[in-house]
């Protein structure tokens, strides 16, 4: 069994095994003609169930054969141009190479003595990102598992900075006074974070959005005013730079003004919009982000990185101390005094992957402009898609895109009952998924069911969009026809 341990004696086994796996994936990618096979949980589950984990195959090739059956054959493939559903990007090869290296060396980024150069590489990428944002000389941050964790950490720092009084501490009565302001289109992880941070049920104040799904700053100003009037404590304003559904970007400069005026922590959730940091042509769309106290970026959304690859950045490195605990066995205070860089001092995690290496390999191989160009292409494609939808009488499209999503709904020529239109759209999404021809997402707007394209694949064309719109219309009409038959 020791032949399976990766070490000086097993280099050849390592090379052969990994190459065999890479060959399988490469063959699968080359022959995948649909984003999904349409397999159902009922069809797939028995194949997984019947595998006896206590009866190993003792053979890499056989294990890969089996994996083809239970995973590779029916996986949902984000690289396919007709995968248009969630915020998943096709990944760039330098990052996949980085992934292979980081799991083989298996550094853990909690302490210098488990990572050495890995720590310095991560720090340099944090500095690079902070520089792109424009956070200033005292900025810092750390890689995280995703936007959810970044938002949680940012709000933890904001909470600690906002504590109503030095003696109030974590007393629930004082935490109950804290308020977080986020638009109604903000990510649900803001509410989840508030709960995890022990804030009151009403802690997150939902600010209405305008027609373009951007936070209404007049409403924010009013909410901040009310907060002060009621003797409550504003803890943070969360501005979203790229809402998950609409890609809309809150008016960052105006929000920054209000945060300054009311002395509130400004967090920018740029989990999605961070791709603009690398953009050659559209960087100005997130102007104002440089005024944030903290920023969430998800490289695994708009930098074409494999999951996970994310970070939280802060304007003032000192605020990260709120996440610092010293453990005798790992990162004693003495080490901080000796200036040994232990990233665990800044992180919510302890053992932590060297995800930064993927971004490093990407920047060193392709350059930031290469990533930015890919992101610009999908933003341009979304504009084209919007024009197609706006000109198509079969569809109602919600907003002109700021990034790369389109939210729309099929509107039949002959049916006016909104509930029936809801059902037709829900059916179309399901039927399309079952066919495997394309994968699209869905969401609700004003209580009604809509469909959503998240365009993150530069290989997707306007022709793909037009073809998928035809498929959706076909399924929706099929439903309405059947429904008419049922009624007769
Ligand atoms: C996706 C997303 C998140 C959550 O990020 P994860 O990486 O999925 O945890 C947070 N905020 C916004 C705006 C997002 O789009």
Image (cartoon, helix red, strand yellow):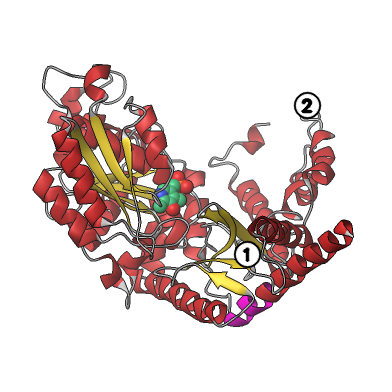
Which residues are drawn in magenta? 462-468
Percent from the top left, x then y, of residue 6?
A: 57, 40
Q: Earlier in the sequence, mark 2 or mark 1?
A: 2
On the image, which quarter does residue 470 sit in?
Answer: bottom right
Residue at the spot x=56%, y=81% of the render?
388
Mark 1 = which residue?
Answer: 83
Mark 2 = which residue?
Answer: 54
> From the Cβ of disc 1, is ligand 1 less than 8 Å away?
no
Residue toward you, 435 or 14: 435
Residue at the spot x=77%, y=69% of the render?
477
On the image, which quarter does residue 422 sit in?
Answer: bottom right
Residue at the spot x=24%, y=18% of the render?
173
Q: Is residue 86 left or right of residue 204?
A: right
The answer to whether residue 465 is above or below residue 355 is below
Is residue 234 on the magenta stretch?
Answer: no
The disc at residue 310 is none
> From the Cβ of disc 2, is ligand 1 less than 8 Å away?
no
């Amino acid at each position: 069994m020791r032949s399976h341990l990766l070490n000086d004696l097993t280099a050849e086994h390592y090379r052969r095994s990994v190459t065999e796996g890479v060959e399988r994936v490469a063959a699968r990618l080359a022959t995948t003609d649909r984003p999904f096979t349409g397999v159902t949980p009922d069809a797939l589950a028995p194949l997984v169930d019947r595998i006896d984990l206590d009866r190993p195959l003792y053979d890499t090739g056989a294990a890969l054969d089996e994996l083809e059956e239970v995973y590779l054959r029916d996986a949902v493939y984000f690289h396919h141009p007709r995968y248009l559903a969630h915020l998943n990007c096709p990944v760039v090869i330098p990052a996949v190479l980085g992934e292979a290296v980081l799991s083989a060396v298996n550094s853990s980024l909690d302490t210098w003595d488990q990572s050495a150069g890995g720590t310095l590489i991560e720090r340099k990428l944090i500095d690079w990102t902070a520089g792109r944002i424009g956070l200033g000389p005292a900025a810092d941050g750390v890689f995280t598992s995703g936007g959810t964790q970044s938002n949680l950490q940012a709000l933890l720092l904001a909470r600690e900075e906002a504590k109503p009084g030095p003696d109030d501490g974590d007393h629930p009565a004082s935490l109950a006074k804290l308020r977080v302001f986020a638009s109604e289109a903000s990510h649900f992880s803001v509410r989840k974070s508030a709960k995890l941070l022990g804030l009151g049920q009403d802690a997150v104040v939902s600010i209405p959005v305008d027609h373009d799904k951007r936070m209404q700053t007049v409403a924010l100003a009013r909410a901040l005013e009310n907060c002060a009037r009621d003797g409550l404590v504003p803890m943070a304003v969360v501005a979203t730079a790229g809402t998950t559904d609409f890609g809309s970007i809150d008016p960052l400069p105006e929000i920054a003004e209000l945060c300054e005026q009311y002395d509130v922590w400004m967090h920018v959730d740029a989990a999605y919009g961070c791709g603009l940091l690398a953009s050659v042509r559209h960087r100005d769309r997130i102007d104002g982000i440089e005024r944030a106290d903290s920023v969430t970026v998800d490289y695994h959304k708009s930098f074409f990185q494999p999951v996970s690859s994310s970070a939280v950045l802060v304007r003032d490195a000192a605020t990260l101390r709120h996440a610092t605990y010293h453990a005798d066995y790992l990162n004693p205070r003495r080490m901080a005094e000796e200036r040994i860089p232990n990233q665990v001092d800044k992180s919510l995690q302890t053992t932590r992957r060297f995800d930064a290496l993927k971004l490093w390999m990407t920047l060193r191989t392709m350059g930031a402009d290469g990533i930015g160009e890919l992101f610009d292409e999908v933003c341009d494609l979304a504009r084209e898609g919007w024009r197609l939808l706006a000109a198509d009488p079969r569809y109602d499209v919600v907003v002109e895109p700021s990034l790369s999503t389109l939210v729309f709904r099929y509107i039949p020529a002959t049916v006016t009952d909104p509930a029936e239109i809801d059902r037709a759209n829900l059916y179309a999404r399901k039927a399309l998924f079952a066919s495997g021809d394309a994968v699209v997402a869905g969401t609700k707007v004003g209580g009604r069911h809509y469909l959503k394209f998240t365009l993150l694949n530069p290989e997707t064309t306007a022709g793909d969009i037009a073809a998928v719109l035809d498929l959706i219309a076909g399924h929706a009409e099929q439903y309405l026809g059947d429904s008419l038959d049922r009624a007769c």
